[in-house]
Image: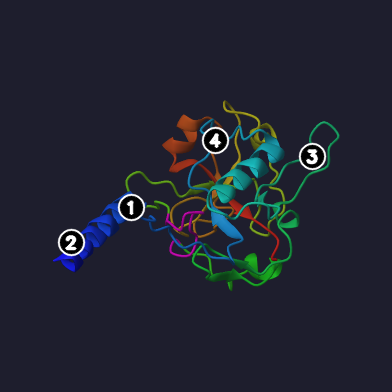
Amino acid sequence: MRDTRLATIFVASALALAALTPIASPVAAQSADMNFFITSEGPGDGANLGGLEGADAHCETLAYAQGAGGLGWKAYLSTIDEDGSAAVHARDRIGDGPWHNQAGVLVAADVDELHSDAANLTKETILTEKGDPVNGRGDDPNMHDILTGSNMDGTAFTDSDYDNCENWTSNGSGSTRVGHHDRTGGGQNPTSWNSAHSSRGCSQQDLQGTGGNGFFYCFAPAG
């Protein structure tokens, strides 16, 4: 009888301890290779990203939240020659590659491949830092216009009266170059991921009105 009582007490104590012990929540797997993503959200102020520095910081913040901070993240954005400052080309900001998405899939081996037809850049491979796809043409809402300010070769886009949204500091009038992450749509180069057409303005409303949401690409040098 005494042994039975002791066994009962032991079981009850074990159950009570188990109830007090927190159960670990499952965490989404983060690819150790991720050094490329499309932002899951923009700063929310149209093309005013706080310049290149602010855009880079936004990339770092999003990556850090997923355990991928501290890799020297850079926004894939170009700036034009303005007030004596030389133009900055997006292709020169992002390292040498190779680059992998959040799922660990290779999207490009180097800068030349990234800007060629051999790049593995599609709606299915251009994932956010969380590993999610982004709405494209045919989805509601369409958000396939991605800020770049670039030509298809990754150099700074220039044109008559073009101001590149005052080099990522304007949320009003002006224009910047955008690509289509889903590789479809309208514009001069509808299948280009980085230089499909120019935006009709720099405000959040204007970007959304033509199929965007102020998203951009983030790259880090390969480790």
Disc 3 or 1, which lies upstream in sequence?
3
Q: Secondary structure at mark 3?
A: loop
Q: Amino acid at mark 4?
A: Pro
Q: Secondary structure at mark 1?
A: loop
**Magenta residues, start to end:** 123-133
Expressed as whole percent of the image width and height from the top left, the position of residue 121 reads 53, 65
Mark-to-mark CA distance, 1 and 2: 68 Å
Q: Nearer the viewer, residue 26 or 192?
A: 26
Mark-to-mark CA distance, 3 and 1: 36 Å
The answer to whether the residue labelled 4 contacts the one labelled 1, judged by CB atoms less than 8 Å apart, is no
In the image, which disc is placed on residue 43?
Answer: 4
Quadrant of the snapshot with the N terminus? bottom left
- For the point 68% across and 42% down, the residue is 159
The answer to whether the residue labelled 3 contacts the one labelled 2, judged by CB atoms less than 8 Å apart, is no
Q: Amino acid at mark 2?
A: Arg
Q: Is residue 22 above or below residue 172?
A: below
Expressed as whole percent of the image width and height from the top left, the position of residue 148 reads 61, 48
- For the point 36% across and 53% down, the residue is 21
Q: Which residue is mark 2?
A: 5
Q: Nearer the viewer, residue 49 or 166?
A: 49
Mark 4, residues whose alpha carbon is within 10 Å: few (<14), some, or many (≥20)?
some
Mark-to-mark CA distance, 3 and 2: 84 Å
In the image, which disc is placed on residue 81?
Answer: 3
Q: Which residue is mark 1?
A: 138
- Magenta segment: does it hold 125? yes
Mark-to-mark CA distance, 2 and 4: 63 Å
